[in-house]
Amino acid sequence: MAGITFKRKLYQNLLDWKRNRSGRTAVLVEGARRVGKSTLVEAFAKQEYRSYILVDFSKASSEIFNLFNDISDLDYIFLRLQLIYNVRLYERESVIIFDEVQLQPLARQAIKHLVADGRYDYIETGSLLSIRKNVRNIVIPSEETKLRMNPMDYEEFRWAMGDTVTVPLLQKAFADRLPLKEAHRKLMRDFRLYMLVGGMPQAVSEYLETNNLSSVDVVKREILDLYFSDFHRIDPSGRVSMMFEAVPAELNRNSSRYRVSNAVKDARNDRMSEYLADLVSSMTVNISYNVSDPNIGLSQSKDMDSYKLFIADTGLFITLVFRDKAFTDNIIYQQLLSDKLATNLGYVYENAVAQMLRASGNELYYHTFPTDSGKHNYEIDFLLARHNKICPVEVKSSGYKAHASLDIFCDKFSSRILDKYLIYSKDLAKEQGITYLPFYMTQFI
């Protein structure tokens, strides 16, 4: 399975860019480390161009780096690239890839002039692209079409499993509001496997090769170690690492927001916003903001100081929870496989829903409001803007249909509501205006 290339939806976005932009912009594919950016863009270059040069700045020579210190003579740069990589470039038929472009910011700055020259297409890939030190002292080119690459979504995971049928059938069932009945048990089992393996291509490849979740866990630990190494380079004090590592514990507290002071004991408010920005820019987490006014313009009322964090890949999330213990001690694997996940681990499902909603292109928002007594808060887990209305989404890790928060919220904001969803582990149903949706249908909302 070494070197396997999985089918990814972003390939079509790259095709659209190539056909519609015709060299007028470069395309920048950004995403977390090990999410599959380099593999995708090289496969695209091989298939869609007559020739390509891949400049991997993670291992490029000093000569390659120094080419971008002076871009006044593009003819010379193109000649040197062709000689060094032993590849001939053809005008309007070739593409140059700048892989891990954050390691050579001057190459990114040069995009403005390379695009204006017009001879070739350009693809950039990178992670940590918005980190301060990676954009310091350069002019960010406006000639970039940005594409975000997430971990493999559930449909891409099913493709990797050799299944191209299930998700289109699920989409039809969702559209027609048809229960899955006898098929539901297997569909949930398949979805729980996705949660355990996750959507990082290396982890998926390891599962296909070994059919062993212990081996998959080793791969995920290696990816997490890579992330912590990146965090240390971003912030040697360790605060970004602590914020990332605390995500499962903060979700487990079931509080209305992520509390930085629980993760970083000596947190200073004037610096923590910078650390948070760096963590979010790493694209290893998904952030959901609390909104004070749940209306169509959700972003207009988000509270920048009240938010929740989710790990961008649920497979990594499960490994992170028990990172300091052996694989055999990770009870989430055991309980998910046997469909007996404890109630206090329900935040695993909430993380999976956040991942699926984000992969579908949604920004994440939630809403809290006080109970009549004022001692506690009601909470709507996710809010989605649809047309000129909003759709509240409540997540239940079990099959229970209790939804007091959802009922009270919908009574309070009845004129703003389009559809109401409760996502849970049982079959699709619709009762009293609420759509009860199994987890594997989240992507269709």
Image (cartoon, rainbow, N blue to C red):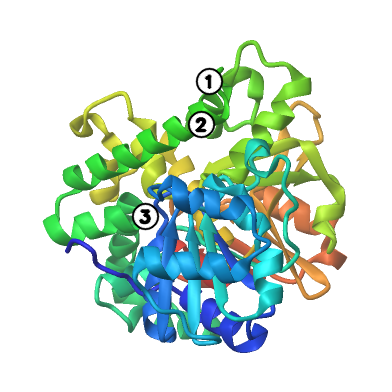
Q: Amino acid at mark 1?
A: Gly
Q: Are marks 1 and 2 in contact (CB under 8 Å)?
A: yes
Please state which of the two labelled residues, at mark 3 or mark 2, is closer to the viewer.
2
* N-terminal label among 1 and 3: 3
Q: Which residue is mark 1?
A: 238
Labels 1, 3: front one: 1
- At x 56% / y 79%, what residue is drawn? 120
Please tell me which residue lies in front, 218 or 390.
Answer: 218
- The amino acid type, in three-letter code, at marker 3 is Met
Give the residue at x 73% y 54%: 140
Q: Secondary structure at mark 1?
A: loop
Q: Are marks 3 and 2 in contact (CB under 8 Å)?
A: no
Q: Position of residue 428 (x, y in %)?
A: 47, 71
Residue at 81% in and 56% down: 298
Q: Which residue is mark 3?
A: 200
The secondary structure type at the circle numbered 2 is helix
**Could you tell whether 98 is left or right of 105 in the image?**
left
- Work out how far the residue at label 3 is from the one at label 2, CA to CA, in angstroms: 19 Å
- Residue 248 placed where, x, y %? 48, 33
Relative height, residue 106 to residue 267 (above, below): below
364 or 368, nearer to the observer: 364
Task: Return the mark for residue 231.
Answer: 2
User: What is the C-alpha distance between the residues marked 1 and 2?
Assistant: 7 Å
